[in-house]
Amino acid sequence: MISFENVSKKYQDGTAAVDSISFTVQKGEFFVLIGPSGSGKTTTLKMMNKLIPLTEGFIYINGKKISDYNIHELRWNIGYVLQQIALFPHMTIEENIAIVPELKNWQKDKTRKRVTELLQMVGLEPEVYRNRKPKELSGGEQQRVGVVRALAADPDIILMDEPFSALDPISREKLQEDIIHLQKAIKKTIVFVTHDMNEALKLADRICLMNHGKIVQVGTPEEIIHHP
Ligand code: ADP
Ligand code: ADP
């Protein structure tokens, strides 16, 4: 589904953020990138949907070279959840979730049904929440909307960059449970960045350990615990 072959990223100031990494993420897998701050996790994630260009190597998405993808095609089929809440403040919750479906010209009824379904999925009563503005929601609720917004148009792949790190421990735990259930239900390919090993062990099918722009180890949580 996602394959990196000797991929490197050097920023214009000379920083070698990612240094010849290779790995494959299987369809339906929950793949967690973990490592200390500055180890290259975010850079790796951003290269997967062409938010930044790679310097060397090849990335394949569904067998097709990333350089051969039209940027819209790629963005529409890859959902992206950021660390900081990024809902549009002047739009309602429903409008925020409907952004990509509208870009794809979905019928109004279909979009509305989808919004209802997504809000229910993360325990937000649709009739209470759909017409609210983001500032009328708690941080944890906003982040839940951010997560389901990335799922709205049914992308094949979802990229998440420390989506829960700004939350209090209780909201964080609730969202971790939500995302485990979501992934079981929708069987999407998820690439999830964190620096929290407990979070990685809880969520991952496989964990990819990074340090100084290189991959140190890739394995299941059991393998990571028993062969650190
Ligand atoms: P690219 O090579 O992807 O175009 P750039 O090297 O142009 O990226 O960097 C984009 C911007 O980020 C620049 O203004 C750069 O100065 C700035 N930047 C530099 N160092 C860092 C850093 N450590 N973290 C985030 N941004 C940085
Ligand atoms: P992580 O997500 O693991 O914290 P990053 O991928 O954000 O790591 O950063 C990897 C390295 O690249 C760090 O040394 C960081 O300072 C540097 N870096 C990130 N963005 C930029 C940028 N735009 N320009 C220059 N250096 C950057």
Image (spheres, rainbow, N blue to C red):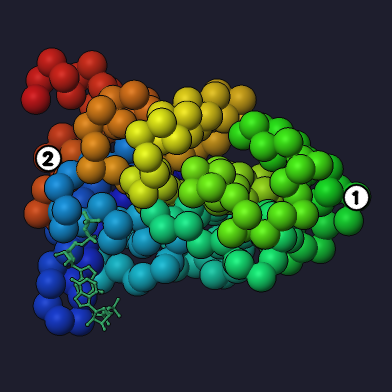
**Who is closer to the viewer here, 90 or 76?**
90
Q: Are marks 2 and 1 in contact (CB under 8 Å)?
A: no
Q: Dividing the picture into quarters, in which one does residue 186 lie?
A: top right
Q: Which mark is residue 175?
A: none
**Ligand 1: quadrant of the figure:** bottom left
**Who is closer to the viewer here, 164 or 197?**
164
Q: Which mark is residue 109?
A: 1
Residue displayed at 77% across by 63% down: 102
Q: Which residue is mark 2?
A: 216
Of pointers 2 and 1, the one earlier in the residue sequence: 1
Q: Residues within 10 Å of mark 2 (few under 14, many from 20)?
A: few
Q: Residues within 10 Å of mark 1 (few under 14, many from 20)?
A: few
- Residue 70 is situated, as x and y percent measured from the top left of the image, at 56, 69
- Residue 63 is situated, as x and y percent measured from the top left of the image, at 48, 49
Does 66 sit above or below residue 61? below
Residue displayed at 15% across by 35% down: 217
Disc 2 from disc 1: Cα separation = 48 Å
User: Is residue 118 shown left or right of residue 12?
Assistant: right
- In the image, what residue type sits under mark 1? Asp
